Image (cartoon, grey):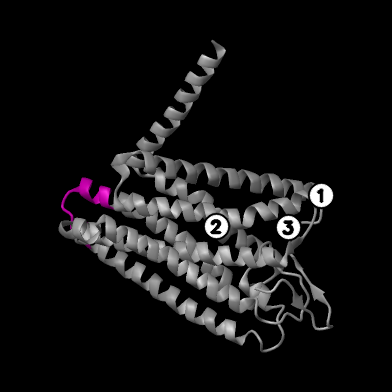
Amino acid sequence: MPGESKMSNGSSFNEFLLLPFTDMRELQLLHFVLFLGIYLAALLGNGLIITAIACDHHLHTPMYFFLLNLSLLDLGSISTTVPKSMANSLWDTRAISYSGCAAQLFLFIFLFGGEFSLLTVMAYDRFVAICRPLHYGTIMGSRACVKTAAAAWASGFLTAVLHTGNTFSIPLCQGSTVDQFFCEIPQILKLSCSDSYLREVGLLVIGGCLAFVCFIFIVLSYVQIFTAVLRIPSEQGRHKAFSMCLPHLAVVSMFVSTGMFAYLKPPSLSCPSLDLVVSVLYSVVPPAVNPLIYSMRNKELKDALRKVISWTFFSHGKIAISLHK
């Protein structure tokens, strides 16, 4: 990737200017505090889920294996955008280096692309568990789980390599100001020379079509899942099945709805302030809220989280007592 890009007037630049949330110093510090709170909540929630699943052998099942991967992707995705935005607000700057922008774009596509692929895999896992329970152990064996999770990560990585390389090979002639609080493809394409962005637009259309196919697969999976659940005679069985599916369905709904509104809203609704709010909704909120959604109705996960928390405080208490003695 090149270290700098040429401007139309022949000069060069080695940094971009991101869109600030505000120019008032007090509000910049408020933005820093709010984002710090959200970031720490995401680190705590996802970190607890990863620890609980890794340490509790009762949770060593395909569903929780995929949930662990989802938490890793959430941690990575929120760490890609939020710390840089916090630093810019704290130091009252808008700058991000050219290589930093390219890295941020790559990681954002990699992690969000991998997350959507993983959510698709998780829908298939729920479908097999409820609609093909007798074959679940065979279809979703440990090797199959590792392969499908690896495929989800690999799909995000390949997508990121393709889009990042293509986006940053386009000549930029419209300045260096990115109308977003992090580097993303649509805002960088606005800086490109006329007609030079058509190749990347074509790739985006293809990527959008593939994402739509995944979305239809998830919808069809849940149509069959709910059809099967409604046939379960016992109310307790139906409740257990719904408890398994509703958190995943809620995460998918939030992920898809915010992303679709951000990228498919009509141009008449587009303005920097609204784009800024929407981008927070789809890039910052889900990684922080997902742990809460998954743990709210899941008794096994809540029990494992209680064990992790109680063990942490108990061990720290023992250490403090021994040091005091």
Q: Nearest the camera: 27 or 64?
A: 64
Q: Amino acid at mark 3?
A: Phe
Q: Residue at x 69, y 70 (%)?
A: 271
Which residue bears the numbered disc 3?
21
- The answer to whether residue 279 is magenta is no
Tell me if residue 315 comes above or below residue 134 in the rendering: above
Name the spot of residue 76 as percent of width and height, x first: 54, 55
Magenta stretch mostly in which secondary structure?
Answer: helix
Q: Secondary structure at mark 2?
A: helix
Which residue bears the numbered disc 1?
25
Tell me if residue 143 comes above or below residue 27 in the rendering: below
Q: Secondary structure at mark 3?
A: loop
Nearer the observer, disc 1 or disc 2? 2
Decide: marks 3, 1 in contact (CB < 8 A)? no
The answer to which of marks 2 and 3 sits earlier in the sequence is 3
The quarter holding residue 54 reads top left
